[in-house]
Amino acid sequence: MKKIIISFWMLVFVIGFSQEKKIVSTLLSNFPLVADEFINMDSFGYYYYIKGNVFYKQKDNELFQYKNLSLGKIKRVDLQNPLKIVLFYEGFNSVITLDNQLNETLSFNFSKNQNNPIVASAVGLASQNRLWIFNSLQMQLGLYDFNKQVFQPLSQPFQNLIEFYQTDYNQFYWIDSNGIVSFCDVFGKISTLGKIPEFDSAQIISNEVMVYQSENQLFYHNFKDNKSSIINLDEKIVEKFRIKDQFLIIFTNSEISTYQISLP
């Protein structure tokens, strides 16, 4: 009888532990915004977005804008440093850097680099006046020095295509076509974090966790136990999401909603 009771409680524990956890979020505010693409919010409360291929920075009655229609569509915006914003124009193989008032400070056209041919398909700001660049011509990841205008490869040629990438000063993260999440540091060391299900968009929070979107649902994923948890939201349509500190920002094509969220 004692063994039956112990087995019963062990079964209850296993069932309870295996149930999918749900992360609670609390709506703090809504802000009307009509844009083609929401980029992010910085630590000073400015919102960044793209409309009509013009890049905007807005807070209350303050509004800054930058446009360079001659370079085509803005493919990517890096906001790690609000004093050195990076705009990537993939169609023209070019990068523009802006200051905090969206004045142009630097311009790079990688097609003009005769010594080290570069066709950039991924770009992000790295440390020490460098850019992360994935050179699709060689299928290699490397660092591009602003001052020397030299590309230094860090990896062997990639075997799989990059479906998603994210950068910070010291790491380049990517998810390949097989759903494998990896990162490379500035010294060229590559590590694998795990595999995630199919997704529409994603944000890697650390080397242990990430948040990804599948259809209109957000999930918190832990690489250590390889489990995903639903993030409860009031939103029915999620065009884009961003996590900044303990805030979850949801863009719905006409409105920005800010949630307080506590991730495990």
Image: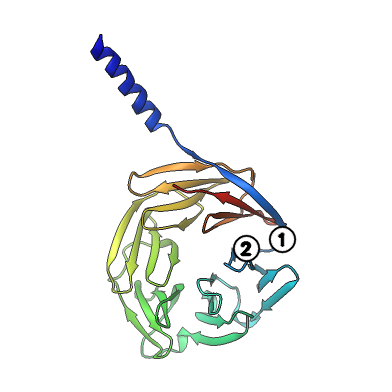
**Numbered disc 2: secondary structure:** strand
Q: Are marks 1 and 2 in contact (CB under 8 Å)?
A: yes
Q: Position of residue 60 (x, y in %)?
A: 73, 67
- Extreme residue toward the right, this view: 61
Q: Which residue does the image show at 34% across and 28% down from the upper left?
A: 14
Q: Quadrant of residue 64?
A: bottom right
Rendering colour mode: rainbow
Q: Position of residue 197 (x, y in %)?
A: 42, 47
Q: Quadrant location of the N terminus?
A: top left
Let me know if residue 197 appears in the view. Answer: no
Residue 116 is left or right of residue 33, and the answer is left
- Extreme residue toward the left, this view: 3
- Extreme residue toward the top, this view: 1
Q: Nearer the viewer, residue 178 or 230?
A: 230
Q: Residues within 10 Å of mark 2 (few under 14, many from 20)?
A: many
Callout 1, which amino acid? Leu
Q: Examine the rendered structure and indicate whether residue 9 appears above or below residue 35.
A: above
Q: Quadrant of residue 189?
A: bottom left
Q: Residues within 10 Å of mark 1 (few under 14, many from 20)?
A: some
Q: Position of residue 139 (x, y in %)?
A: 35, 71
Which residue carries the number 2 mark? 38
Mark pair 1, 2: CA separation: 9 Å
Callout 2, which amino acid? Phe
Q: Which residue does the image show at 32% across and 69% down from the upper left?
A: 185
Give the number of callouts.
2
Q: Which mark is residue 33?
A: 1
